[in-house]
Image (cartoon, helix red, strand yellow):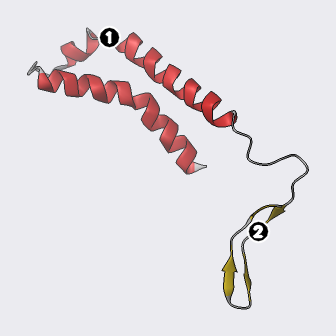
Amino acid sequence: MLRVILSHAALFLLPFFGYAVWLWIKKKTQTSETWRQGPMLHLALAGTVMVIVSLVFFSSFEQASKDADYRPSRLENGVFVPGGFE
């Protein structure tokens, strides 16, 4: 669950990171004024859209049929058998 939360947080923060890199490349001074007068609403909206698109994208893939049973990973005769749906 932590991986899912961190990946969506990274997707949300990606536009802000891109804006910071753009300011650094353009050699603009990175003061609080630059950030306050910057496109914060647009960056937040872009991050939110990226998170929503990723949620829709990953939820649209069906992993297994509804009748499938999950078998956890196990050791059989000293051999690791990975889990999966059967």
Q: CA distance from mark 2 to mark 1?
A: 48 Å
- What kind of element bears circle 1? loop
**Numbered label attached to residue 20:** none
Q: Position of residue 78 (x, y in %)?
A: 68, 90
At a point 74% along the width and 91% down the height, the residue shown is 77
Residue type of the residue flagged with mark 1 = Pro
Q: Quadrant of the C terminus?
A: bottom right
Q: Position of residue 5 (x, y in %)?
A: 55, 42
At a point 45% along the width and 29% down the height, the residue shown is 12
Q: Quadrant of residue 61?
A: top right
Residue 14 located left or right of residue 59: left
Q: Residue furthest right?
A: 67
**Numbered label attached to residue 72:** 2
Q: Establish if 3 lies above or below 27.
A: below
Residue at which label 1 appears: 39
At a point 58% along the width and 25% down the height, the residue shown is 52
